[in-house]
Image (cartoon, rainbow, N blue to C red):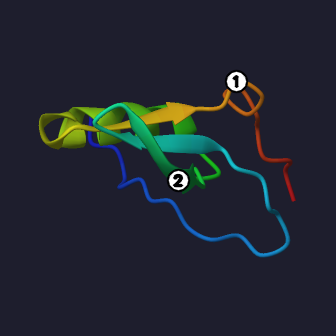
Amino acid sequence: MTLPPISSSNRIGDSRCDAVLASQDRCTGPVRLPISRASDFVDQFNRTYQSVGLKLTANKATANWQHPSP
């Protein structure tokens, strides 16, 4: 099964911080997660960038958040 690419993008009018990026165990900044499949995005990011010391951690308050249907 092939999954479509996951991407994170700016969403106007919503200033939530969905996750925190850490480099070498030091917080470096906030991250917006994609509206769908956020946990997949975090897992894929961490697998891809762990070798260079980056880690993405979803905020507990938004870890299970689902974007409301239009």
Label 2 Cα neighbours within 10 Å, binned few <14 / some 14-19 / many ≥20: few
Image position, residue 65 (x, y; %): 76, 34
Q: Looking at this view, is 29 or 58 the one in front?
A: 29
Residue at 50%, 31% in the rendered image: 57
Residue drawn at x 58%, y 32% as measured from the top left: 58
In the foreground, 57 or 63: 57
Asked whether the viewer can see residue 40, the reply is yes
Q: Residues within 10 Å of mark 1 (few under 14, many from 20)?
A: few
The quarter in which the N terminus is drawn is: top left
Number of marks drawn: 2
Q: Which residue type carries mark 2? A: Gly
Left or right of 66? Residue 57 is left
Along the horizontal axis of the image, is 25 left or right of 1?
right
Residue at image coords 23%, 32%: 47
Residue 53, picture quadrant: top left
Residue found 76% across the figure and 38% down from its top = 66
Indicate the secondary structure of the residue bearing disc 2: strand
Q: Locate the C terminus by quadrant.
A: bottom right
Position of 57 relative to 15 (above/below): above
**Helix, strand or loop at disc 1?**
loop
Residue pointed to by mark 2: 29
Q: Can residue 37 be seen by looking at this rendering?
A: no
Q: Position of residue 14 (x, y in %)?
A: 82, 63
44 displayed left or right of 70? left
Q: Quadrant of residue 5?
A: bottom left
Say whether disc 2 or disc 1 marks the residue closer to the N-terminus.
2
* Above/below status of 67 relative to 8: above
Q: Which residue is mark 1?
A: 60
Whether residue 42 is situated above or below residue 4 in the rendered picture: above
- Which numbered mark, 2 or 1, is in the foreground of this view? 2
Give the farthest residue toward the left. 51
Picture coordinates of residue 35, whole percent (x, y) = 65, 51
